[in-house]
Amino acid sequence: MAKWCTIAPILYSDIEEKLEIPSELGNGARLISIPAWLKKDTMTQYLDYSKRDRLMNYANYAIEVIYDADSYGAPDLDWKGKYPRSLQDRALEIINLCNIAIWISNPCDFRYELIYDVYEHNGKWNFKSYNEYIGLKPHKKYMDHKLNMQDIQLSKSLLDVLIKIQRPIPVWVAIRSLWRAITEDTWEVRFLLMWIVLEGLFGPDDPREITYRLSQRLSLFLSSDDKNNAKPLYDVIKKVYGWRSKVVHGMRLNKLSDDDSDDILFNAEKWIRLSLFKILSDPKLLMNFNENRETYLDNIVFE
């Protein structure tokens, strides 16, 4: 049995100096300084110029998952899903969920666009394969956000929950849709994908009066600590949902200024982050979304 490593170079350079490197992210994942061997020709020879340039000059950190495997593609024997997966697939999912957990904690410009699978031989890591991915794209209002140790610790606790979520339940479907949303650069598509996440979490099974019911559910859920905030938030959510409907039905958005479009997308992303943080931080809430989402959401108005 050989030692394997699945590793993602992180395109992010402004981590605060107080951050401890290496940092354990949980489930075998670590945030480390990017190793020198990952920038050698044996690892970069297949990359085009732009990706090689970003790896060589902008990737100062990496997320690694190290594990033992008999061979490349060896099955993950602990996996209970419908279709088999390899240990490399498991490591890839952990890295992906690490990035999502960090985004929920701090939606900064922390992303990867390459993942390598390497194996150890004679004390050195050797190239086996690599894959290219579309990296996370932060909202412009978050571009200057910086990670700190508190963000890392929070993402670690979120990752512990994300790894264990049953599939498919609304929260897991929302997480999958979220990844597609935060890697999308086109405003209209990103905005609609964000609403797919919100509707997956809070949309009623019965589509009648969906604007009213979704807006009410989301506003009450986010205002549970102070119900006085629910009505103003409801009005904002309903207004933003109205733009979602306009985009879906192909209506012209020439009356929507750049600043306004940034604001309504920012709101949708903020509501997703707050909602998922709240759900993932409370086992009872996660169970409610897992087992009786409709009943729970219909009853929060009475709480």
Image: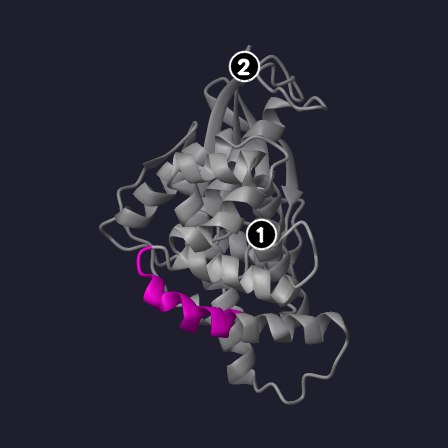
Q: Where is residue 127 in the image (x, y as percent from the top left)?
A: 60, 31
Bounds of the magenta segment: 225-237
Q: Which residue is drawn at 53% across and 57% down?
A: 54
Give the farthest residue toward the top. Answer: 1
Q: In the rendered view, would you say 37 is above or below 83?
A: below
Which quadrant would residue 123 be assigned to in this image? Answer: top left
Which quadrant would residue 34 be assigned to in this image? Answer: top left
Tag 2 residue? 2
Q: Which residue is drawn at 68% across and 71% down?
A: 245
| Residue 233 falls within the magenta-colored stretch | yes
Q: Where is residue 152 in the image (x, y as percent from the top left)?
A: 33, 45
Q: Where is residue 122 in the image (x, y as percent from the top left)?
A: 49, 17
Q: In the rendered view, would you say 221 is above or below 36?
A: below
Q: Is mark 1 on a helix, strand or loop?
A: helix
Q: Residue at x 55, y 56 (%)?
A: 136
Which amino acid is tagged 2?
Answer: Ala
Q: Can residue 230 be seen in this view?
A: yes
Q: In this view, does 32 lie to the left or right of 260?
A: left
Disc 2 to disc 1: CB gap under 8 Å:
no
Which amino acid is tagged 1?
Answer: Leu
Q: In the rendered view, would you say 250 is above or below 50?
A: below
Q: Can residue 41 be seen in this view?
A: no
Q: Where is residue 124 in the image (x, y as percent from the top left)?
A: 48, 24
Which quadrant would residue 184 be assigned to in this image? Answer: bottom right
| Residue 107 falls within the magenta-colored stretch | no
Query: Of discs 2 and 1, which sits in the foreground?
Result: 1
Give the farthest residue toward the left. Answer: 18
Question: Disc 2 or 1, which lies upstream in sequence?
Answer: 2
Tag 1 residue? 178
